[in-house]
Image (cartoon, rainbow, N blue to C red):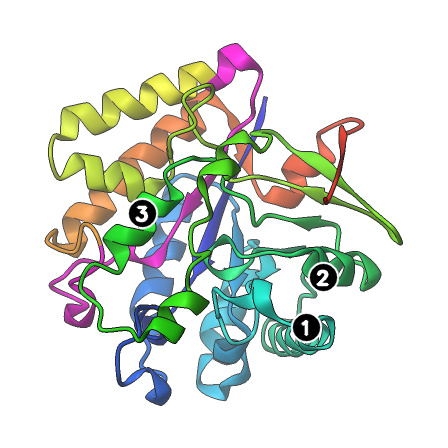
């Protein structure tokens, strides 16, 4: 059974921007620290993954060598928007088209690889996004997280902010809504007016629909390492029983600790050191790869037969 592993390469500035913190406009970065860790860990598990890159980071010449190294190592390159705004779902169709085109061009120029997959920042999406992806030749979208706890995650994330009502309103769809828990947990196809596009959800626990991505496991491990590993073993077993090849998500902060990035103390798990996080993340990925044939999202999609179709409305 084919599984996939992906990483949203959210940068320091993008987290500060979403959280409403000052200083993001200078585009502070930790890419030079985290990308070597990504390459080391994926090499240790001998697995190519999909890396969704933010276009603004790709547009900076200083990042070209770092981002190109991901492609050289055999990882699939995906599009994670240009400005990384989780309110992308509020954009007009013209704004969506400009955003996706700018990101695609910057990422292609920086890495030498043209993305065929997209994930919206903060799991944001809209019919306009899907229509534009299909019209521009993208193969799949990966912006859904079929869980009911999105509003709880959003409240936790913004518990320490001083956002204005307007700023908070823009971010009101971050991490989705309760009804997202009713979305399919396995790949399917969006039925669009001008063509279809595949959707590869970030897998959640079958039936219970609670998250099983690495950030959530690290959060649990802060309470009990044994509980976190048992939980993930249970999730992987449930996926096998249900015939679900999981698509597991990593974030940069699953590899970086509070001792390395002190500006993001509001993020769950930042009381851990980076070395502890990398050790635990590697362990979880070893559990995944020992149970499933794990690779990129494009490889997982290619292994599937005909997908069920679903209308966007």
- Indicate the quadrant containing the N terminus: top left, top right, bottom left or bottom right: top right
Q: Residue furthest front?
A: 165
Q: Residue at x 64, y 56 (%)?
A: 126
Q: Residue at x 43, y 56 (%)?
A: 174
Residue 78 painted magenta: no
Q: Badge 3: how crowded within 10 Å, few (<14), some, or many (20+)? A: some
Q: Quadrant of residue 36?
A: bottom left
Question: Which residue is labeled 1 in the image?
Answer: 92
Q: Quadrant of residue 233?
A: top left
The magenta segment: 239-267
Residue 64 percent location from the top left of the image: 51, 79
Q: Is tag 1's residue or tag 2's residue first in the polypeptide sequence?
A: 1
As helix, strand or loop, the secondary structure at mark 3 comes to helix
Q: Badge 1: how crowded within 10 Å, few (<14), some, or many (20+)? A: few
What is the CA distance from the residue labelled 3 to the residue labelled 1? 27 Å
Label of residue 128 in the image: 2
Q: Is residue 172 above or below residue 20?
A: above
Report whether 135 appears left or right of 105.
right
């Amino acid at each position: 059974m084919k599984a996939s592993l992906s990483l949203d390469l959210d940068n320091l500035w993008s987290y500060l921007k979403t959280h409403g913190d000052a200083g993001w406009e200078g585009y502070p970065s930790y890419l030079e620290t985290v990308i070597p860790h990504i390459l080391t860990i994926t090499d240790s598990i001998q697995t190519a993954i999909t890396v969704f890159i933010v276009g603004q980071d790709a547009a900076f010449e200083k990042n070209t060598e770092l981002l190109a190294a991901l492609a050289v190592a055999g990882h699939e390159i995906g599009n994670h928007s240009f400005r990384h705004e989780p309110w992308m779902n509020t954009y007009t169709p013209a704004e969506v088209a400009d955003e996706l085109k700018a990101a695609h061009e910057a990422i292609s120029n920086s890495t030498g690889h043209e993305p065929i997959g997209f994930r919206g920042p903060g799991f944001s999406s809209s019919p306009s996004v899907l229509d534009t992806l299909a019209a521009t030749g993208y193969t799949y979208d990966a912006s859904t997280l079929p869980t009911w706890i999105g509003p709880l995650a959003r409240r936790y994330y913004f518990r320490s902010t001083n956002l204005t009502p307007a700023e908070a309103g823009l971010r009101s769809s971050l991490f989705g809504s309760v009804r997202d828990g009713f979305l399919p947990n396995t790949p399917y196809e969006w039925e669009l007016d001008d063509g279809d596009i595949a959707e590869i959800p970030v897998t959640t626990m079958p039936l219970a629909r609670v998250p099983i991505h690495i950030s959530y496991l690290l959060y649990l491990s802060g309470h009990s390492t044994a509980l976190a590993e048992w939980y993930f073993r249970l999730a992987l077993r449930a996926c096998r029983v249900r015939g679900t090849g999981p698509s597991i998500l990593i974030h940069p902060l699953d590899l970086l600790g509070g001792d390395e990035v002190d500006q993001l103390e509001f993020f769950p798990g930042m009381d851990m050191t980076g070395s502890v996080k990398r050790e635990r993340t590697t362990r979880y990925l070893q559990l995944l790869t020992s149970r499933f044939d794990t690779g990129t999202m494009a490889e997982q999609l290619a292994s599937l037969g005909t997908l069920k179709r679903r209308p966007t409305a």
